């Protein structure tokens, strides 16, 4: 069987999918620079991906040729309609591509589905439409009629759920997840939805492995926090944290950037997408990430992010932009996964990605469901 990644971007979710054992993958992506990144990481001497890249708009794909041949359908649905920083048009936004993901699910009938989106999807004003997404995932075969409003379709789905003697087609669960709780060096909150075909074991969310309180308590145990190397073996003799001894401290920016050389002065002389990005400025409400905490949420915009999310205050007191490789480290991409395009395009690929480590954890949980049929 094959696996399908919609809106594949720079490949964060796909790297995690492959590490969990799902391969090959069909990558659907409309952005040419992202397609170049995916292709070159497939053809590399040290490939991070395996599969085929299809540079195509998902709206025009006829999925029938893959019906009942797909194991996992994964989609990081474009977030602009539901973003807290967007126009707040939600389902009315012409960039809302949830209908296309659900159309693919309806035709493909995959064994499992993973969907990721911004936490704005859970706002009270979006709750009715979010409920509509969930019930469609439960009963994808009940398709909307031509010209039917989503409200009318939702009503029919609810009636079917209430009166049908046949169980759900998919078991669906969802949660708002902070990536830092799973060892990602970044405070990144996103909504994850998991739909598993009902003839397989139900999905169980993996338990968080890392904890803010452990990190902060360790900070209180020393007067020289930046030197204790949170999480490193050489400091395993630090006092135990009694209230959360089975959890690890949040991974920090310092941990994530360990071992990286100083950034190159220019793109032309850089390796690993690691060169200085000039122009960072300090002004009110625009503070950067600090070394001894997880980073702020990495954003897709190069400049002008409102909270200074893609900037850092380093040990030398410099307020600067993270290099592209540093951003990739914070998204847990492997160093041999290289990005192609201009600075803006690469930042978009990295900022929109699902952190690879988090994706690996979730896809391993999906794999367990499918193996425990």
Image (cartoon, grey):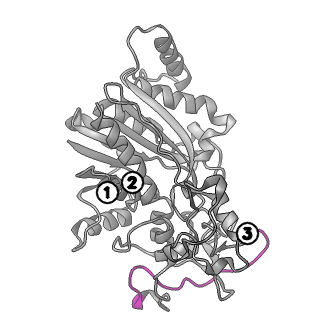
Looking at the rendering, in which quadrant would you find the C terminus? top left
Mark 2 or 3, nearer chain start:
3
Disc 3 secondary structure class: helix
Disc 2 secondary structure class: helix
Q: Is residue 306 visible?
A: no
Residue assigned mark 2: 360
From which residue to which does the magenta span run? 268-286
Q: Main secondary structure of the magenta part?
A: loop
Residue 269 belongs to the span the image colors magenta: yes
- How far apart are labels 2 and 3 at the CA level? 32 Å
Is disc 2 in contact with disc 1, using a CB cutoff of under 8 Å? yes
- The disc at residue 220 is 3
Quadrant housing residue 247: bottom right
Residue assigned mark 1: 19
| Residue drawn at x 67%, y 58% as measured from the top left | 213
* Residue 273, horizontal then vertical, whole percent: 42, 79
> Is 357 situated above or below 155?
below
Mark 2 vs mark 3, foreground winner is: 3
């Amino acid at each position: 069987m094959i696996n399908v990644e919609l809106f594949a971007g720079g490949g964060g979710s796909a790297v995690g999918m492959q590490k969990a054992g799902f391969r090959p993958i069909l990558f659907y992506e409309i952005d040419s620079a992202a397609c170049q990144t995916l292709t070159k990481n497939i053809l590399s001497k040290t490939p991070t991906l395996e599969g085929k890249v299809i540079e195509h708009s998902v709206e025009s794909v006829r999925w029938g040729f893959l019906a009942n041949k797909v194991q996992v359908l994964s989609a990081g649905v474009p977030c602009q309609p539901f973003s807290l920083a967007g126009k707040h048009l939600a389902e009315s936004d012409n960039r809302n591509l949830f209908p296309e993901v659900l159309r693919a699910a309806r035709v493909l009938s995959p064994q499992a589905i993973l969907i990721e989106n911004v936490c704005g999807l859970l706002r009270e004003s979006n709750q009715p439409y979010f409920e509509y997404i969930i019930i469609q995932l439960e009963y994808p075969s009940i398709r909307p009629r031509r010209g039917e409003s989503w409200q009318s379709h939702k009503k029919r789905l609810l009636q079917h759920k209430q009166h049908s003697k046949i169980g759900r087609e998919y078991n669906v669960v969802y949660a708002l997840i902070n990536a830092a709780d799973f060892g990602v060096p970044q405070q990144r909150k996103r909504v994850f939805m998991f739909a598993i075909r009902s003839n397989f074991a139900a999905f169980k969310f993996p338990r968080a492995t890392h904890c803010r309180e452990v990190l902060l308590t360790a900070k209180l145990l020393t007067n020289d926090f930046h030197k204790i190397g949170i999480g490193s073996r050489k400091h395993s003799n630090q006092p135990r944290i009694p209230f959360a001894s089975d959890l690890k401290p949040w991974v920090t920016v310092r941990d994530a950037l360990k071992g990286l050389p100083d950034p190159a002065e220019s793109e032309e002389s850089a390796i690993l997408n690691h060169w200085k990005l000039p122009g960072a400025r300090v002004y009110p409400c625009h503070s950067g990430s600090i070394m001894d905490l997880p980073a702020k949420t990495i954003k897709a915009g190069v400049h002008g992010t409102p909270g200074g999310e893609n900037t850092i205050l380093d040990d030398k007191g410099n307020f600067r932009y993270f290099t592209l490789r540093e951003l990739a480290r914070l998204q847990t991409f492997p160093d041999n996964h290289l990005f192609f395009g201009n600075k803006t395009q690469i930042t978009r690929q990295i900022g929109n990605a699902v952190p690879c480590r988090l994706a690996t954890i979730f896809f391993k949980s999906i794999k367990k469901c499918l193996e425990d049929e």
